[in-house]
Image: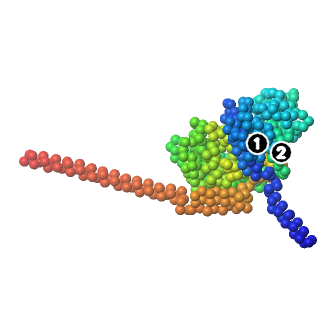
Amino acid sequence: MMYKKFYVSIFIIAVFLFNVPYFTYANTNKKSLIVYENEKTFSSNENKVNHLKELLYVFNEGVEKINLEDYKKEYINNFDSVFVINIKNDISNEDFLYDISIYDKNIYWIGNKIENILEQNKKYSISYKGKIENINAIFYKNKKMILQSKNEFNILSTSKGTEILSTMGDGYNEYPYIIREKNLYYISQYNLGENFVFEDSLNDFFEVKNNKNNEIFIKINNVNPNTDIKALSEISNYLYSQSVPFLISLTPTYTNSKNKNTEGLNLEFIEVLQKIQEQGGVVVLNGYSKYKEDKQNNEYEFWDIKSDSPITNDIKSYIKDRVLRGLRICIENNIYPLAFEAPSGAMDNKGYIEIKKYFSTFIGYFQNNNDNYFISSFPYKINKSDLFNTFLPENLGILNSEDEFSTERVKENLDKLSVVRGYSAGLSISPNVKINNLDEIIQYIKDNNIEFIDLRFKSNYVKIEDISIKSKNGNIYLNYDKSKSISKESKKSNFEITIKNINDMIIGFVSFVLVIFFIIFIVFRKINTNKFTRR
């Protein structure tokens, strides 16, 4: 009997240990519903609903959104939590008002028209008082965050049963910013550019018990064949000396905007990239080609920036073609991308869905609007959403030597991000940044005990047609059909062009000779005719 108890105990411990990852974050088997009136607010291109939908995949297995007008009775009961956002007008959908009044799971109301449920629902003691415009700071966990934007904020009164999670101030008075009462959470206003307080509060909303370690990636930004390879090597050597893994965002070709000729990697640049890989640098494919001189089009390979709209090409074929071309050029020069980044983050949902087919990992900013260009970011890594397998957010700005304040700005952004439990940070650095500026930031990160992300030790993959690249435990594995080499196709094309040129020359020469013979024939015939006439 004693042995039986012993084995049962061992079994229980084993089950616990094997399931430790599931205890370190939220129960992601849950589903959330977003109810909204408008996806975008008046005079703004930011789509808060799309942004929120992607964000909630951090804590949920499924996320759906529904327009308030389309809401049907009891639909809310299919979800474990509900978010209400972007409500401008008084709510007239009686089915929704009734369902949310009796809903016993967590509700997060964001911004306007909270009075519509407070006025007729005596379950809550809080009440709506009005709006205020002079708010300039948010207070949260003993930190004060200065607001850059000016917006209207809603004011609610509270009671003893209300928990105030965050406050806001105008320099004279403080008001509740985020509150909780029973199953209702409320935030006065939600701005995508200043959202870390709200996003940390989701840890409490979803009852996260233990958070993942804070992490950061360092990415050398905008590397292409025009990049100063001496400066690039200095950055790589420095990061290697500091044992800091890093990413390099690479566009393998550039296109001359005048003659439209595309030029690729030269031998010296290839050798530098290969050495960077040896030093711990992981390549992120940043599209296929940049324009050499036309700065207006330089950063928007997957977006029509002139009309500020999605590209009109067949998006599936277009993306596949660009990805294949970029990957083949890299692979044939022993360069192995493990992730993808859209130039300037410019790509709509259709583009994200196509990239998801080929890449396990997406880096950068998120374009939340499918109609106009507007990017935002997240403080968390996102897994298994509708749009991404894994999304690593860039959210600290860019460190460069041209902006003398960029070093301090990066520190400030990291300090703001630090209010988020279990955050994932992303920092871009210019390929010509001064080493002393970079060293200041790297030491600052180390002093704050933030873990550096090394994609080589994560399970990443790239899979498209005959190309397969995988990473695991620090190693990169490649499968590739060499018969489909771009260089071979290029050589074949050059050979065919040469043959065609030779044929053209021969045909031209023969034609020229025939014309000469014909002229000679006519001349001599005329001469003979004249001789015959004289006789």
> Where in the figure is residue 170, as x and y percent of width and height?
83, 29
Q: Is residue 28 left or right of residue 368?
A: right
Name the residue located 27 percent from the left edge and 52 percent from the top edge: 514
Residue 54 to residue 117: above or below: below
Question: Cβ–Cβ below 8 Å for labels 2 and 1?
Answer: no
Sort mark 2 into few (<14), some (14-19) or many (20+) by Cα contacts within 10 Å.
few
Q: Is residue 288 left or right of residue 77?
A: left
Q: Amino acid at mark 2?
A: Asp
Name the residue located 65 percent from the left edge and 39 percent from the top edge: 369
Sort mark 1 into few (<14), some (14-19) or many (20+) by Cα contacts within 10 Å.
many
Name the residue located 40 percent from the left edge and 55 percent from the top edge: 500
In the picture of the structure, the residue carrying the numbered disc 1 is: 82
How many angstroms separate mark 2 from mark 1 (CA)? 15 Å
Visible residue check, residue 139: no
Q: Under tag 2, what secondary structure?
A: helix
Q: Is residue 324 left or right of residue 113?
A: left
> Where in the figure is residue 52, as x and y percent of width and height?
72, 42
Q: Amino acid at mark 1?
A: Val
Q: Nearer the viewer, mark 2 or mark 1?
A: 1
Q: Under tag 1, what secondary structure?
A: strand
> Where in the figure is residue 182, as x and y percent of width and height?
86, 40
Image quarter of residue 510: bottom left
For this rendering, which residue is in front, 89 or 297? Answer: 89
